[in-house]
Structure formats: structure tokens, C-alpha cells
Amino acid sequence: MAIIETRQLTKKYGEQLAVNQLNIQIKSGSLTAYLGTNGAGKSTTIRMLTGTLQPTSGEILYNGKLNHSSIKIGVVFQNSVLDDELTVMENLLLRAEMYHHVDQKRLDELITKIGINEYAQKKYGRLSGGMRRKVDIARALIHQPEILFLDEPTTGLDLQSRKEIWQLLNALKESENIGILLTTHYLEEAEYADSVYILENGQLLEAGTAESLKRKYSTPMVWLKVKDKTNLKLSIDQKQIVGEDDRGICINVKNIIEMFDLFEAERHNIIDFTYQPIGMNEVFLKVTGRNFNHDSNR
């Protein structure tokens, strides 16, 4: 049974449809990536799932029940809710007081598991971004939630810090048997996901595992920088053109042979090209027709 399951979940703001008949599942011990560009409905969905926003219609089942109080929920926000002037330990102790069943043993185990022992007595505001994010995760896990919501958890972190956070989250989903729902604008992070949902304008466009989606959308793509865009667009099927970004015009090709045929036909027009194996960035581009990295992450 899923920890959380939605059935035809819908939210309207007046005439504006923010989320439209959404059906998703989040399971124990799994990572679910929830992807979409600006205005896709990600934040609205999370607010409904966490009980801070009432849906217009549809159902949310928590362990098969309609009452969200039947499960324990943890949330890591983009902006921390911890006090910069308190130490890490003081912040966690203060949060622990909100729950009757949390004792010092749980805090000690959590601090060790997350790897924040060495700066437990340092002020939170003096920590690096990666350190603060680990403490935020510890705060969200104090009461042993069944599901953890991560809203852009690695925004602004350097690559090494992001890798450390993902190593931690992968370990936690197994050791705590916790379900994780992730929103991120670093689509390569969705490679870690057991389930992926792609949303656009409140509508669910695609769902599956990261691997199954990459297999489904594995048609090669090539980006061409050319002298004459008009000439290129006239010489190929317009349906092959997926979009355009700083790498050039993005074109679908059926196979490598077709790609080299294209290169030969446009050899006097091509300035540069980019070709890469398909990843979640390319899946997202194919599903939505939009380049995620060039849109707002909200």
C-alpha cells in the first residue's frame, strides 16, 4: 500500500486550474521525483498533500485513509525554519520539545546517522550551505516521519555538497524506510528516483521510473549551431525540431545514421554540434517541449 495516493486530485483558484485530476503514489522506502516548470503545480500539490491547502475535488489517501493526521509527515523547505543564533543541538532540542515521544537517544542517533556530530555545538547561521541542509533534514526527521517532502533541497549548493546530500538521502530512505517526495530543478537528481512524475500546467504528462522513461524517450537528439537557421528549418521535417537553447537548435533523429546524414547535408551550414546520451533533462525536454534549466524553478 502507498503511504500517500491521490485520486483525481484537483485544485482551482477561481477559473485558474492549478492541478488537474492528479493520480500519483508515494511508497515506503522509495524516492519519488515530482518535476515541472514554473506554474506547473508542484508547490500547490505539496501544500495539498501536507494538509495546508484544501483541494477543490478529488481524494488524498494516507495509508488508505482520508485523514492526513493518520501519518507522520516531515518537510524540508527551501528556506530554513531554524534559528541562526542557536547551535545545531539547541535548534534540534527545541524542535524535539514539540514531540512527546522524542528523547535524547533519538537525537544522538539522528545526529550520528546524518553526520553532523562535529558541528553540533556550532551556531546554525555559521554553517556552510551543505551543512545547514543536513541539519534541516535532521530537523525534519526528529519525529520519525513516514514520508519526507523535499522542496528544492539542493538549490544553491555546490556539486560536492549536492552529492553528499544525495548519498545521505539514499541511505535514509532505506535505514528509516521512509518515502521521499522530491521537487528539484537539477533534473540529473531525478536519476536517483524510483518513480518520476512530470507535470505541466497542472496536468500530469508522464510517469514511470527514471530508467523506463529514458528507454521510452531514447530517440537520439543533437543540438546544431548553424550559420543559417532558416535554411536548416526548411531542409528538415519541422516535427523533428524539439526546441532551442544556448547549445543550438535541438533536433530528434531516428538513429546515428540519420544524424550523420544530417551532418553531411548541412556540412557547409554547421558551426558546432552537441550530442549526448539521453538523461532526465532530455526526457523532460521531449515530454514538455521545454528546456527545464532555462525556466524558473517554481
Image (spheres, helix red, strand yellow):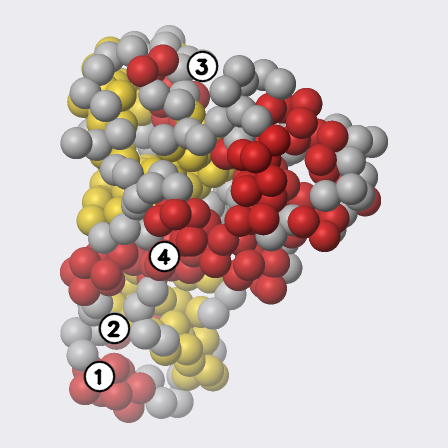
Image mark for residue 192: 4
Q: Earlier in the sequence, mark 1 or mark 2?
A: 2
Label 3 packing within 10 angstroms: few (<14), some (14-19), many (20+): few
Q: Nearer the viewer, mark 2 or mark 3?
A: 3
Which residue is tagged 1?
A: 256
In space, the residues marked 1 and 4 are separated at their CA atoms by 28 Å
Q: Earlier in the sequence, mark 2 or mark 4?
A: 4
User: Mark 2 and mark 4: span between their CA atoms?
Assistant: 22 Å
User: Which kind of residue does numbered mark 1 sit on?
Assistant: Ile
Query: Residue drawn at (18%, 64%), measured in percent from left and top?
Result: 215
Q: Is residue 193 above or below residue 275?
A: above
| Near-viewer residue (231 or 20) | 20
Percent across and percent down for residue 136 are 60, 37
Callout in the foreground (1, 4): 4
The crowd level at tag 2 (other Cα within 10 Å; few <14, some 14-19, many 20+) is some
Q: Which residue is mark 3?
A: 52
Q: Report which residue position mark 2 lands on.
A: 220
Q: Quadrant of residue 66?
A: top left
* Comes first in the chain, label 3 or label 1: 3
Q: Amino acid at mark 2?
A: Pro
- Identified at 36% across, 76% down, the residue is 276
Query: Pointers 2 and 4 in contact (CB under 8 A)?
Result: no
Question: Which of the pair 280/3 is nearer the observer?
Answer: 3
Which residue occupies 29% across, 11% down?
A: 67
Say what secondary structure mark 1 lies in. Answer: helix
Q: Nearer the viewer, residue 118 or 275?
A: 118
Q: Is residue 143 above or below residue 231?
A: above
- The answer to whether one can see residue 140 in this image is no
Q: Quadrant of the N terminus?
A: top left
